[in-house]
Image: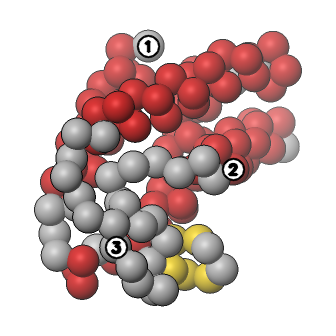
Amino acid sequence: MYLIFTAFIVTLLFIYLYNQLPDSQQLLNKRIVANICGWNLLHVVAWWGIAYLLDIKFISDLPKIILLMLVWYALESVVFSFTNTPTVENQEIVYQNPYLPRPDDFIFNFAGVFGYLIWRYS
């Protein structure tokens, strides 16, 4: 669990520092296709890694991973709710406020977890 806590702190620092860049240099928030951007792809990779570290075995561990996702989402929302970041109005980006998580992050989180499970059992 220490690794997960460390990953959370590193993630918060990365998000904060990355969002200090001018909007024109924030490539992770640029729309790739539909409503998908680099941040979404990082969610898939990160949650694949978390599933690997936690050695997720599907049904028996699903409540644990869901709870972790909810706690992570809530903490990230609280920590960055204090940032005074204006909402960006731009059709080329996905996150209107790049500091705050979005509910559809869960889709990409689960894609990472299920991707790990497919890899593990294939």
Q: Position of residue 40 (x, y in %)?
A: 54, 60
| Label 1 element class | loop
Left or right of residue 85: residue 99? right
Callout 3 environment at 10 Å: few (<14), some (14 to 19), or many (20+)? few
Q: Amino acid at mark 2?
A: Ile
In three-dimensional space, the C-alpha distance between marks 1 and 2, rounded to whole angstroms, equals 23 Å
Numbered disc in front, either 1 or 3: 3
Q: Residue 97 versus residue 64: which sits nearer the camera?
A: 97
Quarter that holds the C terminus: top right
Identify the secondary structure beneath mark 2. Answer: helix
Disc 1 + disc 2, Cβ < 8 Å: no
The percent position of residue 28, horizontal first and vertical second, equals: 38, 70
- Residue 49 lies, with reference to residue 115, above or below; the image says above
Residue tagged 3: 88
Residue at (49, 71) in percent of width and height: 94
For marks 1 and 2 on the same chain, the one whose residue lies earlier in the sequence: 1
Residue indicated by mark 1? 1
Residue identifier under label 2: 107
Residue 79, quarter of picture: top left
Image point (16%, 69%), residue name: 21
Tell me the distance, in whole angstroms, between the alpha carbons under discs 1 and 3. 35 Å
Residue at 37% across / 61% down in the picture?
97
Label 1 with label 3: CB-CB less than 8 Å:
no
Q: Residues within 10 Å of mark 2 (few under 14, many from 20)?
A: few
Residue in the picture at 66% in, 16% down: 64
Q: Nearer the viewer, mark 1 or mark 2?
A: 2
Q: Position of residue 78 (x, y in %)?
A: 35, 31
| Mark 1 residue type | Met
